[in-house]
Amino acid sequence: MSNDGVGLIGGTSFVGERVSHLLEKHGYEVTTFSRESSRNIVSLRFTEESPQIIENWIYLAPIWTLPQYFSLLEDYKAKRLVALSSTSRFSKLTSSCMTDRNIASQLVKGEEQVLQWANAIDCTLVILQPTLIYGRGKDKNVSEIARFIRRFGFFPLLGQGRGLRQPVHVDDVASACFSALQVPLGRKCSYVISGQEELSYRTMVERIFLALGRKPVFLPCPLWLFTFAIRTVNVLPPFRGLSAEMAVRMNMDLNFEHTEAKKDLGFRPRPFHPSQTDLVERT
């Protein structure tokens, strides 16, 4: 990189915490930008007290919100930007759920707007598209399944749960963000970052059971019953991330290869063998 400073937007997210930790571990000065006022966090604006030039940036908030910060990045003379998107831009475009389709459309539009901006100001751009992120008990995917299992002792399954998944650990996502900062100036590229293993939805849930020290117990159920069960528990705060659409996707393949990220970023994700730390948030 051209200097040892990195601007981080979205640094208070669970991915952001790991990215910040990794950058500081390697000796980089991290300036975290947030709407919240707290120690080591500055507001999302250009101030006299802030560094006058920050050439390298990582954006971890939803990519469709990034355009509102283009002027901020220009004020700080940004030359390289790493932005986090999602493989949902591919997998949810044809979903039967309108909310999912809207998310996919926002991701696609966000990526397009960021690329247009980067081309206009000649800013190096790396867009990372992770699969299902998990880790440290703070994600909205694997950890929610773990919470359901801890609460009820079983997990509902529609059909055989054969759809393929590639969960990617939050620390591997952070490593990819760090590596992307080394991409040569002038490039505009995007990379899928997925877990090492392709495994069925059922196998993924079985490993969550085992990580919790429990015997896997599945409750086969028709779609109407699954939908009723999810809507019932959805009123409880710990399970608001669960949706009936999960049932439909249990038998859909949502695996994505990361060959290009492996070649260009040295991306080497871990297999899916979650620990208690990955599934239970520590306070």
Image (cartoon, helix red, strand yellow):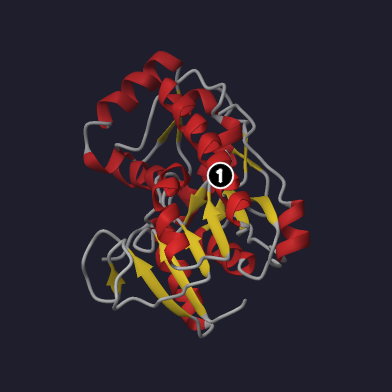
Q: Quadrant of residue 29?
A: bottom left
**Dot 1 lies on which element?**
helix
Q: Quadrant of residue 279?
A: bottom left
Q: How many marks?
A: 1
Which residue is nearer to you in this view: 158 or 269? Answer: 269
Picture coordinates of residue 8 (x, y %)? Answer: 43, 66
Residue 31 in view in this figure: yes
Which residue is nearer to you in this view: 218 or 21? Answer: 21
Which residue is nearer to you in this view: 219 or 268? Answer: 268
Picture coordinates of residue 92 (x, y %)? Answer: 54, 29
Picture coordinates of residue 165 (x, y %)? Answer: 61, 41
Which residue does the image show at 59% across and 44% down from the upper left?
116
Residue 53, above or below 112:
below
Residue 185, above or below 53:
above
Which residue does the image show at 37% across and 43% down from the upper left?
149
Picture coordinates of residue 208 (x, y %)? Answer: 48, 49
Position of the C terminus, as image quadrant, is bottom left
Amino acid type shown at disc 1? Met
Q: Quadrant of residue 239?
A: top left
Which residue does the image show at 55% across and 48% down from the upper left?
117
Determine whether, in the image, residue 103 is placed left or right of residue 184.
left
Determine whether, in the image, residue 100 is placed left or right of residue 256.
left
Determine whether, in the image, residue 128 is placed left or right of residue 225.
right
Position of the N terminus, as image quadrant, is bottom right
Q: Kindly identify which residue carries mark 1.
A: 204
Which residue is nearer to you in this view: 235 or 215? Answer: 235
Q: Residues within 10 Å of mark 1 (few under 14, many from 20)?
A: many
Residue 275 in view in this figure: no
Which residue does the image show at 61% across and 78% down from the upper left?
2
Residue 115, above or below 106:
below
